[in-house]
Amino acid sequence: MPTPRIWIGPEAPEGLSEAVGGAGADVVGSPAEAEALVWRGPWDGVREALHPGVRWVQLGSAGIEDWVEHGLIDRERVWTSAAGAYAVAVAEHVCALVLAGTRRLPELARRESWERLEGVRLQGRTIGLVGAGGIGRAVIDRLRPFGVRVLAQTHSGREVPGADRSFGPDGLPALLEASDVVVLAAPLTPATRHLLDAAALARLRPTALVVNVGRGGLIDTDALVEALRAGRLGGACLDVTDPEPLPDGHPLWSLPTVLITPHVANTSAMLEEAFREHVVDNVGRFARGEPLRSPIDVDRGY
């Protein structure tokens, strides 16, 4: 088979060109020469790089809502995201947030005097996982040793390996009502925006913990603040927010049962290594004419 011609840009992370070349491709100097693009830049610049000869575009992020919203994902070529590439790093962060929330570390860390606040152990708790792609499956693998029960909800309703029970979209109310901890790891689409609105939050137990590592827009922020202030929710641990960045002085910063990390479940250093491995695998598949990892479904929007 001919050696595929791939352009990496407009920003090329250190070592990525060498890795792609080592995977059996020619790294070319401009998009005009390429039949595939590894796009590492803002979503609004890709149109200038596309031409009829481009058969595949690899994006650098797992979340692609901006690309879908602006109609950039076409049907003329294969588009792939980085979905799954960052699963391990994000799943580790989920474990940290779940443990912090159930042990009441957000409240304890704010204390300025010696006062006992008792958390609960994770063993025997029910984890409701909304979204069971690469991140969700990695979360299950890492939380299982704690002796938890896992409920998983997906768009397709398929059986999720490692889950005690699997739900489709219609099963979300039952999952929320049964969960001690709800972990959001779903993509943001028109169907999932404000998935946790006031009505959904009202289904949660007053002691429940919400953990969000998906996208901030999965939660109605105003409804979340209201539920926390009223004591109708045990707490929230958020690596993503809406709006993002979360403005100084926003009510979420001062709520004692909230822990916020500034979208750092996957740091730059971890991201580049994981993305490089993902791209190298896909370049090899492209060169061999095999199906690519993480293809984007235009109709589903992820």
Image: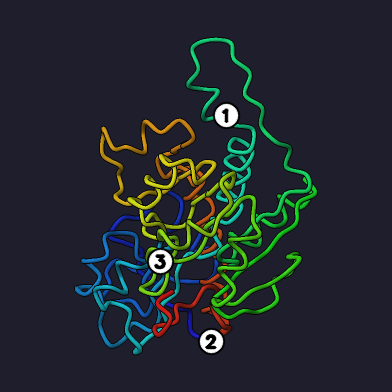
Q: Is residue 248 left or right of residue 240?
A: left
Q: What amino acid type is highlighted by mark number 1? A: Leu
Closer to the chain start, of discs 3 and 2, is 2
Q: Is residue 72 left or right of residue 240?
A: left
The foreground one among 55 and 15 is 55
Q: Is residue 159 left or right of residue 9?
A: right
Q: Residue at x 40, y 85 (%)?
A: 299
Q: Is residue 58 left or right of residue 206?
A: left
Q: Residue at x 32, y 37 (%)?
A: 251
Label 3 environment density (alpha carbons within 10 Å; few <14, some 14–19, many ≥20) = many
- On screen, residue 158 above or below 193: below
Where residue 32 sits in the image (x, y, percent)?
25, 76
User: Disc 1 vs disc 3: which is toward the camera?
Assistant: 1
Q: Which residue is mark 1?
A: 105
> What mark, if any, has residue 1 been given in the picture?
2
Q: Which residue is mark 3?
A: 188
The residue most toward the top is 113
